[in-house]
Amino acid sequence: MTAGPGRLEEPVVRFDRVTKLFERPGEGTFRAVDDLSLEIHAGTRVALLGKTGCGKSTMFNMIAGLLDPTEGTVTVNGRDPFREFDSFRGKLAVVFQNDRLLPWRTAIGNVEIGLEMLGLAPQERHDMAQRWLTQLGLGGHENDYPHALSGGMRQRVSIARAFATNAGLLLCDEPFSALDEITGQRLREEFVSLVREKRKTAVFITHSINEAFQIGDRIVVLKRPARIAYDVKISPDLDAAEKEAIRARILDELSA
Amino acid sequence: MSATAPRPNGAPPGAVAAARRYGEVVAPYLVLAAVWQLAALAFPSYLFPPLDAVLARFFAIVTSAKQFTDVLATLWRILAGLAGAFLIGGVIAFVMAQSRTMDRFLAPILTFFQGIPALSWVVFAIIWIHGIELRIFVIMVMTTLPAFTFQILGALRAISKDLFEMVLSFRPTRWGRFRVMVLPSILPDILTAWKVNLGNASRVVVVAELVGATGGIGYELLQQQQLFDMTGALAWTLQLVFFVLLVQRLLAWIETHAFRYRAASEHSL
Ligand SMILES: Nc1ncnc2c1ncn2[C@@H]1O[C@H](COP(=O)(O)OP(=O)(O)OP(=O)(O)O)[C@@H](O)[C@H]1O
Ligand SMILES: [Mg+2]
């Protein structure tokens, strides 16, 4: 864009001293995110690790424009995702922590939701949704309603729904947690190659250090309430000892 | 769901199940008819006329153009009143769901109106309004509006926040939100609201016609009372009852077909 030579590229996601408080009826306020600053640049895959309840999903909701920060600013592509809500159509996609499938739509109908919002023609979105379902191993279940799918199948439908929109920024909240080892492994690999190929930016939450190493090229560990405890780049040419040191540090931060 | 009871030899597989389903539908009405027929044997026929006389009269009404027009007029009034209350109630419910201020303002008013008996509305409407159709329409709307509004409002409030935010994350237009999320999630409750209000409306319409109209089932019932004609009173009443049953069946059919997506436990509640 207007970034001239020498100027740093504008980050895709930027948290600038963000605090998020929740009202607790009768108990004052609860601090879920605390003075958090973080920048995420285009084309990176950031793994977020942190204890349960430390504010990871809350961060996602602020990036997705579903929650408004109490203090500080969140910007995505230089804009405010909460106030300029509609300007992000087709630009970001979320895989939520729970599958959130519409019970009255079939698997393929659920995958088509985002494509409908983008105004694709019915045939086009049907074909696209079909391709994604097949890729995620759900061929033959297109016309099943969510209640007739297993937990892992539902999760894959919700991954297909987010990825089908071809958004540049992917927010994935424990996307591969409900899958068996083999399927999870295959999808993690496909996820990495997809994000790489299409130069997408991905932020994903995980509770597995192994998964963070496998998918991420950067790992961010959060304290509770959400604040950066450890932020490290994972380059492919780390040797075993360096990896082990990073792993030990992550474990350390997580058990602090 | 499908029953796997042992079948008698030679019967085609579907026939038993079909006969059984049919029997389940008919049985309650057969029992009602039998009880009535027993009463008809025990009491004089001007009090409990025999069933065949009632049925003959029922079909006389259906086949007489002039009398069946009265039936249609009443059915039309029920449906028009319900449609009016549904549309107005829907708009009010949306306004209340959107704004806390409007909710706090309108809820007490609706509750106040809910306390007014149908018969009072009949009296008010006769005093205020001269045109018969408009008068009945107002009575029908005013008596069903509060319930309709609260039912739709309840449905709007029950929309899942998680699912709604999932849809929002794709940045739908206002119409897209409504079409993809709001409408499908409130539809089952709207159907239930129609079922409940249909029952209420069919009772209110007779009262409205009894005192405020020159035609319709309620008006005809008044004639039968003046003639002391129990057969006629029953035959006219059955017109209304059968209509309500018919519409209820239709709504139930829509329910089982349109809401197939709902999973049921293999245990009963
Ligand atoms: N709407 C809300 N109202 C009040 N408190 C909330 C709300 N949403 C989240 N919280 C609180 O904020 C904290 C962070 O929640 P969040 O869902 O972001 O955690 P998380 O890091 O995603 O946890 P997990 O790994 O278990 O999913 C929790 O303690 C939770 O109780
Ligand atoms: Mg979470």
Image (spheres, coloured by chain):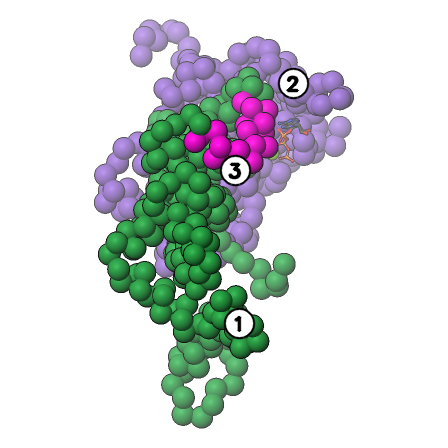
Give the residue displayed 44% in from the left and 27% down from the top: B127
Q: Mark 1 near ligand 1 (CB under 8 Å)?
A: no
Q: Are marks 1 and 3 in contact (CB under 8 Å)?
A: no
Residue A124 in view here: yes
**Closer to the camera: disc 1 or disc 3?**
1
Where is A245 relative to A155, above or below?
above
Where is B55 relative to A125, above or below?
below
Q: Amino acid at mark 3?
A: Ala
Give the residue displayed 53% in from the left and 77% down from the top: B41
Query: Which region of the structure is painted magenta?
Result: B106-126
Report which residue position mark 3 lands on: B118
Percent position of residue A3, x then y: 35, 9
Distance Cα–Cα, label 1 vs label 3: 34 Å
Q: Amino acid at mark 1?
A: Pro
Distance Cα–Cα, label 3 vs label 2: 50 Å
Report which residue position mark 2 lands on: A21
Ligand 1 sits in quadrant: top right
Give the residue displayed 36% in from the left and 64% down from the top: B58
Report which residue position mark 1 lands on: B44
Percent position of residue B37, x then y: 51, 74
**Closer to the camera: disc 2 or disc 1?**
1
Residue that extends furthest to the front in the rendered view of this protein: B227
Which chain appears purple? A
Q: Secondary structure at mark 1?
A: loop
